[in-house]
Structure formats: C-alpha cells, structure tokens
Image (spheres, helix red, strand yellow):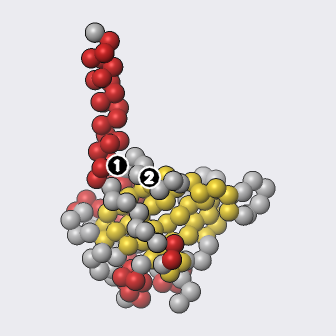
Amino acid sequence: MMKPLFATLLTVVLLPVMVVAATMPPLPKGYTGWKKRERKLVTDKNSLFYGIHYIYADKKALKGYKAGNKFSEGSTLVVDYFNIKEGSAADGPKNMVVMMHKDKRQKDTGGWLFAGYGADGKPSSLDPVGTCFGCHQKDAGQRDFVISTIKDFKI
C-alpha cells in the first residue's frame, strides 16, 4: 500500500517541475558574448531585483532597442543575477538567470517567452506569467514589455 501512495505523491510533486523543465528552452550558448548592459546594483532588500544584474542582448534585440523598444520575432535578452558580496557592493555568487525570447505564440505574456534558470543554468520552476509578466506589463506595457531601454547600453 505504501509504494502506490509514494509513487502518487512523487508524481504529484515532480511532474509539474518536469513539465516546466521539458518545455523551457536551454539558455542560448555564448550569450555572455552578446552586447552587455552596464552593471546595475539594487541595494533595496525589499526589491524583487535586490542584487547585481547584467543584461545581454542579441543582435535582434539590439535592433529592437534602437527602434524604441520595438522587438522583432526571435529577439532574445538574458539577465544574470548575482548576490551582493557581504559588506561591499561587489558581485557575489550568481543566484539566477532569466531569459526573454520574442515568440508570438506566447499570447499570455505579450508575445514573449519568459524563462527562469538556476545559477547552474538548469531550468527553475519560475512561473513566467505570475512572477515576470505582471511587472513587465505594469512597468513597460508601452515598450513591448521590456523594462530596459537603449540608454542602459553603451552604444
């Protein structure tokens, strides 16, 4: 009797994580070689963005920034998030990575696929609609849901 119950519980707990991991694309190879935004430091511990982050934009995304945040299909942005090193403003260990990929099939998130990864680059169980899109919709609805702008990059 315990084995079927354990198997059922394991399926209920692991299946949603496995589905998220199976549907989430891998991080793009070589994204750290893309155009990199200046380092951003957020020291407000109450902020969702507390820490240090860097945005990387592929060539299509750069064109979108230059066009006033009008991004074409396939544009990709990746953000590396780091903790703040104790007692300083230096980069601590990486704590997560997020990606936005312009994909018109993503109707619930304004035509963007939002994906989250752990520091190791493996998919996380981040809820893209609840965790990401709500803020992007509120803060950047008029800029194709991208909060950053060309001003954030030295071009």
Residue 92 can be seen, yes or no? yes
Are the residues at dot 1 and dot 2 in contact (C-beta closer than 8 Å)?
A: yes
Q: Residue at x 38, y 86 (%)?
A: 63
Left or right of 7? Residue 120 is right
**Residue type at tag 1:** Ala
Badge 1, how many Cα within 10 Å: few under 14, some, many 20+?
A: some
At which x and y percent is residue 130? 37, 51
Viewer-nearest residue: 108 or 36: 36
Residue at the limit of the structure toward the right, as seen here:
87
Q: Residue at x 75, y 53 (%)?
A: 86
What residue is disc 2 on?
A: 122
**Is 77 situated above or below 116?**
below
Badge 2, how many Cα within 10 Å: few under 14, some, many 20+?
A: some
Q: CA distance from mark 1 to mark 2?
A: 8 Å
Identify the image quadrant of residue 132: bottom left
**Residue type at tag 2:** Lys
What residue is disc 1 on?
A: 21
At which x and y percent is residue 5? 30, 17
At which x and y percent is residue 12? 30, 30
